[in-house]
Structures are given as structure tokens and as C-alpha cells.
Image: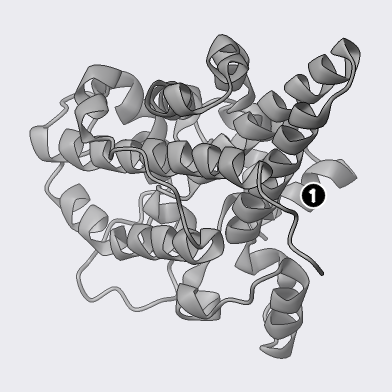
Amino acid sequence: MRCVIASLLLLAAPLQGRAWGEKGHAMISRLAIETAAPRLPEFMNASRGELIYNSNEPDRWREEAHSPMNLAQQADHFFDSELWGPIPTIEPDRYQFMEKVAAKKVELVKVGYLPYAIVENYGRLVNAFRNWSRAKTSADREATRQNAVVYAGILSHYVGDGSQPMHLSIHYNGWVDDKPNPRNYTKDRRLHSRYEAAYVNSAIEAPSVRPKVQPLRRINDVFESIKQYLTQSFAELEPMYELEKTGEFNPEQPRPKGTEFISSELARAAGMLADLWYTAWIESGEPVPKQ
């Protein structure tokens, strides 16, 4: 089971098996706040250190390896597209989706819930922004500020997970043994951490990623945008495996194509995150939709 594998990886390499690693997640948050800060409440920019710290919070939860909390949240980091089908066909909420997964006779813990981790934390951020604006006392204003910064940071984590193609596939750590592999993709079980942590630590810096971050925009349909974002990430899975075959993701000898590929994924995550933060702020000032 994936939960057992994850626990063993956690014990063996506490910082290496986590999506994008600490450096990558921090970079995504840093670039996102640089992009969105002029259009957000000032406290968001003033709290950038907290935002960056909170971007790695869901990976810190994994330290409680066998706790109910960790068992419940570990499937929020991925979505195994092959077990479901096209990402645009997923249901609009987690429980409708779970019913459909159960009907397919797929184990609920195996398919993953990354789209819902993104959209649900987006909703929490909207609510925190709204209550910050409504706060009537300085104590309430500070409490809601802290809530917004926590939710924005946690949202950052899952958005970052969503730009890493192996988080959208059953082939999340080398090609799986029991599936056809006509192009002879690697089965190296160190690929995941080598790609998203070791290579990022060795070869990727913010100045090379920053120019690739898209201009800020308001998202008109948040869940649809999330599905499109994850669909693009999944589409990059086989191109990533092809590049791996040519040695592009060796942290000991970084190469231009590998650096360009990963930098673009980090930049896309930073742009998506900035857009979600900005859209959440706008939405928080609009009337609450009627049920």
C-alpha cells in the first residue's frame, strides 16, 4: 500500500521524499507573494515569512506517521489519474467523487484527492479573508489574519504538489512494474526525490524561475481552472520520463533541458497560486453565494 511505502520513505529520508522538497515549496510561495502582493491586503506581504513556512506544513504532518490525522491527509497530496480517467470529468466535491470511485471498485485511499485539497483550502482562505474584513476588534482582526496566512500557506503546498507530474500518476516514483512500459521508462525508485528535491536543491534558483511566472489574473471558474492546471501537469508526465532517459535530471550534473523543465513547473505553480490568492481576496468581498 502507498501509505506503507510513504512511511518507509519518511523514515529513510525525512526531507527527500516530499513534493518539491522544502526549497521548492518555499520558492513557489515566495514568487507567488511577489506577484500578488500589490493586489492583496498588506498583511499578506508583511507575513511572507509565515506564508513560506506554512507552505511546507502538510509535509510536516507526515511526521505523525501512523496517526489518524496523517492517514486522513496523506492522499490529499496526489491524484492518480489512471485510476479515475480524464481529470476534467471529476465531480465538483470530494464526497460525490468518493461515491463514484467506490462504484468503480477502486480503493478510496489509492486514487488521491489533490483537486479537493486545493479547492477546499481555497474556500477556507476566502472565508478567512472575509472575516478579516468584517472583524470588529483588533483581537478578531489579528486572529483572522493568522487564519488567512495559515490557509494561504497550506493552499500553496497543494498547488505546488499539483504542478509535479508524478503527483498525478500511478507512476509516481519510477514506472510501475505491472504496467506496460514499451518506451522503457526508468523504474528507479529514487526518481521522485531525485527529481523534485535533489535536483531542485542543486540546480534551481528563484532568479531563473521568476521570469517564467505568468502575470496576475482573476480566475472566473476556480474548480475548472484547477482541473485544467492538473490536466496540464499530467500531460507532462511522459515528456518528463523521456527527459529522464537522456540524463536531464541528474543533480550531480545539472543540464539545461532538465533545469528548464522543472523551472517551468515551479513557475506555473507560483502563477496559479498567486491567481488563487488574488481571486480569493476578490471573492471574499462579494456576496456569499446562496445555497
Q: Which of the 4 image quarters holds residue 103?
A: bottom right
Q: In which quadrant of the rendered image does the C terminus lie? A: bottom right
Q: How many labels does the image show?
A: 1
User: Looking at the image, which is closer to me, 45 or 155?
Assistant: 45
Residue 79 appears in view: no
What x and y, as percent, mark residue 11?
Answer: 66, 31
- Residue 182 is left or right of residue 266, and the answer is left
Q: What element carries label 1?
A: helix
- Residue 193 is left or right of residue 201, and the answer is right
Q: Which amino acid does label 1 sit on?
A: Leu
Q: Which of the 4 image quarters holds residue 185?
A: bottom left
Q: Which of the 4 image quarters holds residue 190?
A: top left
Q: In which quadrant of the rendered image does the N terminus lie? A: bottom right
- Residue 74 is left or right of residue 140, and the answer is left
Residue on which the image places disc 1? 71
User: Looking at the image, which is closer to me, 170 or 69?
Assistant: 69
What x and y, as percent, mark residue 122?
Answer: 64, 46
User: Looking at the image, which is closer to me, 246 or 19?
Assistant: 19
Placement of 151 over or under 232, stated as above or below: above
What x and y, as percent, mark residue 37?
Answer: 46, 22
Q: Which residue is located at x 90 percent, y 16 percent?
A: 137
- Residue 142 is left or right of residue 158, and the answer is right
What x and y, as percent, mark residue 111?
Answer: 62, 68
Q: Which residue is located at x 41 percent, y 76 percent?
A: 179
For label 1, the crowd category at 10 Å Cα-Cα, with few meaning under 14, some 14 to 19 and many 20 or more, is some
Q: Which residue is located at x 41 percent, y 23 percent?
A: 27
Q: How is the image coloured?
A: one colour
User: Looking at the image, which is closer to me, 173 or 212?
Assistant: 212
Residue 154 appears in view: yes
